[in-house]
């Protein structure tokens, strides 16, 4: 199933040298493995375990997530704009599936 990472920046306009806020929504069902379906069967665990943020091809931060995070997690961080480059956010789940989003900064 194709999932996406939606990225927004605040403010919408900025210049090199500015510090901006990056907000991202990671589209994912985030199942803990503790919930049961309507037939009483346990829904298998399926959740994001890690997020990697790259700017201009270099890793600027990583995040470890757990099954306790809600559906479609929201992450936010500050980024100093050192040049015009590509921002890429990649999320990996406990089944090895990845999803990513990019934005020109």
Image (tube, helix red, strand yellow):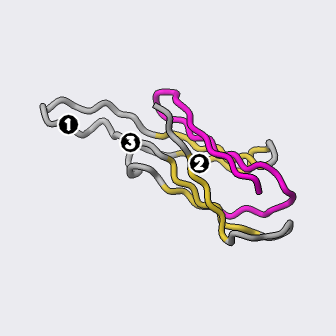
Report how far apart the C-alphas of labels 3 and 1 lie in the structure.
Answer: 14 Å
Please check the rendered image and state whether residue 87 is part of the magenta-colored stretch, yes or no: yes
Count neighbours of disc 1 (C-alpha within 10 A) and say few if under 14, some if 14 to 19, many if 20 or more.
few
Of labels 3 and 2, earlier in sequence is 3
Residue 49 sits above or below residue 44 on the image: below
Residue at (56%, 33%) from the top-left corner? 98
Tell me if label 2 and label 1 are in contact, CB under 8 Å: no
Q: Where is residue 92 in the image (x, y as percent from the top left)?
A: 55, 36
What residue did someone put label 3 on? 29
Residue 50 spot, x, y in % from top left: 55, 41
Which numbered mark, 3 or 2, is in the foreground of this view? 3
| Quadrant position of the N terminus in the picture | top left
Q: Which residue is the site of mark 2?
A: 63
Query: Does residue 63 appear left or right of residue 38 in this picture?
Result: right
Q: Nearer the viewer, mark 3 or mark 1?
A: 3
Q: Would residue 68 be found to the left or right of residue 94 on screen?
A: left
Q: Where is residue 19 in the image (x, y as percent from the top left)?
A: 75, 69
From the image, state whether disc 2 or disc 1 is nearer to you.
1
Residue 64 is left or right of residue 46, and the answer is right
Precedes in sequence: disc 2 or disc 1:
1
Taking the spot 74% from the left edge, 70% from the top edge, the residue there is 13
Q: Distance between the residues labelled 2 and 1?
A: 28 Å
**Residue 71 belongs to magenta span:** no
Q: Are there few (<14), some (14-19), or many (20+) residues within 10 Å of tag 2?
A: few
Q: Position of residue 36 (x, y in %)?
A: 20, 37
Magenta-drawn segment: 77-105
| Element class at badge 2 | strand
Q: Name the residue under label 1.
A: 36
């Amino acid at each position: 199933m194709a999932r996406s990472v939606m990225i927004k920046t605040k403010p919408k306009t900025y210049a090199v040298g500015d510090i901006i806020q990056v907000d991202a929504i990671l589209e994912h069902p985030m199942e803990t493995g503790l919930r049961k379906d309507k037939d009483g069967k346990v829904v298998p665990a399926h959740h994001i375990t890690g997020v990697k943020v790259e700017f201009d091809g270099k890793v600027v931060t990583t995040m470890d997530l757990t099954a306790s995070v809600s559906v479609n997690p929201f992450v936010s961080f500050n980024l100093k704009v050192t040049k015009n480059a590509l921002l890429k956010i990649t999320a990996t789940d406990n089944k090895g599936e990845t999803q990513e989003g990019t934005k020109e900064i």
